[in-house]
Amino acid sequence: MGTPSFWFNFTNRFLFWFWDTLLVQNAKLARFDPFVYLGNLFKSSERKPRALFFWIFSN
């Protein structure tokens, strides 16, 4: 729980979740399908790259 990898992973997922929530607000205004958004949200952790995020916090 106090390991660096836990906090890197937690911060990484939280930032991508927050970014995706901002995107879905624009999608709702544009009448996008919410189920398409939910599918992309569940796949987003595998879609987004982690190498640069890890490199920033490892220095």
Image: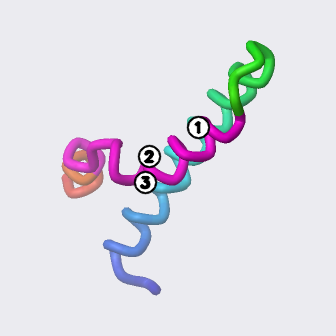
Residue that appears at 44% across and 50% down? 43
Number of callouts:
3
Q: Which amino acid does label 3 sit on?
A: Asn
**Distance between the alpha carbons at the discs numbered 3 and 2:** 11 Å
Labels 1 and 2: the sequence-earlier one: 1
Q: What residue type is labelled 2?
A: Ser
Kindly state the secondary structure of the residue where label 1 is placed: helix
Q: Residue 2 carries which label?
A: none
**Distance between the alpha carbons at the discs numbered 1 and 2:** 9 Å
| Residue corresponding to mark 3 | 12
Does residue 45 appear left or right of residue 14 in this picture?
left
Does residue 13 appear left or right of residue 28 in this picture?
left
Q: Report the front residue among 17 and 10.
A: 17
Do tag 1 and tag 2 residues touch (Cβ < 8 Å)?
yes
Circle 2 Cα neighbour tier, 10 Å, few/some/many (<14 / 14–19 / ≥20): some
Residues in magenta?
34-53
| Residue corresponding to mark 2 | 44
From the top left corner, tell me how far across and down residue 36 is, in percent.
60, 36
Kindly state the secondary structure of the residue where label 2 is placed: helix
